[in-house]
Amino acid sequence: MLPQKLQKKLEERQQNMSLRVLPMYKQLADFSSNDYLGFSGNASIFSATHKYLVDSSFLQNGATGSRLLSGNHNLYDELESKLALFHQSKAAIVYNSGYDANIGFFSCVPQRGDLVFYDEYIHASIRDGIAMSNAKAYKFKHNNIADLENLVERHTAAVKDNNSAVYVVTESVFSMDGDSPHLKEMALFCKEHKLFFVVDEAHAVGVFGSKGEGLVQQLQLTDLVFAHIITFGKALGCHGAAILGSEELKSYLVNFSRSFIYTTALAPHSLATILQSYYFLESKEGKVQQQLLQNAVKVFKSKVESSKLKQHFITSNSAIQCCLISGNNRVKSIAKKLEENGFNVKAILSPTVPKGEERLRFCLHAYNTPKEIEKVITVLHNYIRE
């Protein structure tokens, strides 16, 4: 038996059709995973990782401890140097996951008396990190620079005389909408007002940029970004994350970021997989996968338009395409019908998204064929019109 308050919360989830359960794996056409480039099952990356570990004599299963104790093996230096070079950053620091990176950064960097302004649709991991800090935080309307400007004007006068910092936080591609802010305009605004600009690129790395660098580099904004958070569990097909920034920021995080300090380091195999995924991303084969993904996005958007479903979709040029279907019951019902037709498309329910903005979240991949895409849109069209 659970405590009564916990049992009541579960029952409320059941009543409003939002109770989460772990899904069983089914062999369906994949329109739900974050494996945008198909790297998670890539045999070349798998083989290259094994060969690299054997050739380098990294024949161990675990890291043996945190990085500040016994876990800082040589692969960390090689990977972090590679990340800094690839992403045109002064330094990189690897974390065990994107969640660890975000709570590790936001819980220790903003200080008492500082201000954090964040997009209202920012990821839960960033919200959790901000909640753990001693800074005051205010949300601005989604992708609305005018609202951000109003917030800055209203709240920053109080911090000008006490050396307090002001942080502005957004994502380059939002996970629940697939859309992007006007990053360049926001970055220039932060520069003009001496604000520290922080960008999470979890869903942009591997998808945007000539080499999959992400939107910050594609738009040549690296020098305007204070901290740049990337993850490896999406397009890179493996696990972990990194924060990119100055050498001073890295040193600060090593000393004060609790999710970095008090956890066992990643095993050599995990780091070698990230490293080989980056090498593959830069290769001719990697570029082919990136182009196949971009083609899939174009085909999907074209089929949505020709099927007269465009008004149901949030505008997005990313691998995430969202069809708004109000109501937990209805969106779950249509997701089930898509599954019965052989397609794995996830229903995103409230309270994960606001009530009335429930949706089907289509994640596109390099391996989604035009035929698959045409069929899933046809099935969606048949059921959404009912």
Image: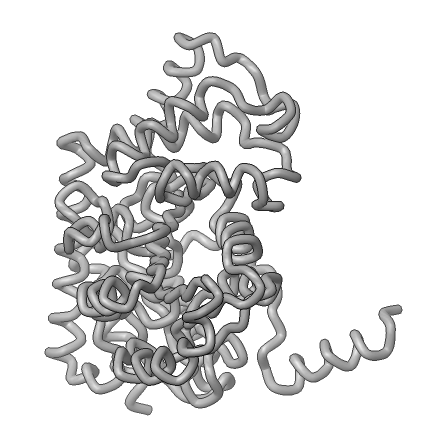
Q: 371 or 68: nearer the eye?
A: 68
> How far from the left and from the top, in percent, is residue 363?
32, 61
For the question of whether residue 310 can be seen, the reply is: yes
Q: Residue at x 43, y 43 (%)?
A: 249
**Quarter-wise, where is residue 45 in the image?**
top left
Q: Is residue 341 left or right of residue 259?
A: left
Q: Is residue 286 left or right of residue 263?
A: left
Q: Quadrant of the N terminus?
A: bottom right
Q: Quadrant of the C terminus?
A: bottom left
Residue 56 lies, with reference to residue 300, above or below; the image says above
Q: Residue at x 55, y 60 (%)?
A: 111
For the question of whether residue 334 can be seen, the reply is: no
Q: 153 or 341: nearer the eye?
A: 153
Q: Residue at x 31, y 73 (%)?
A: 322
> How far from the left and from the top, in percent, is residue 52?
38, 15
Q: Residue at x 17, y 33 (%)?
A: 285
Q: 327 or 72: nearer the eye?
A: 72
Q: How many marks?
A: 0
> How far from the left and from the top, in percent, is residue 175?
37, 65
Q: 257 or 274: nearer the eye?
A: 257
Residue 297 lies, with reference to residue 355, above or below; the image says above
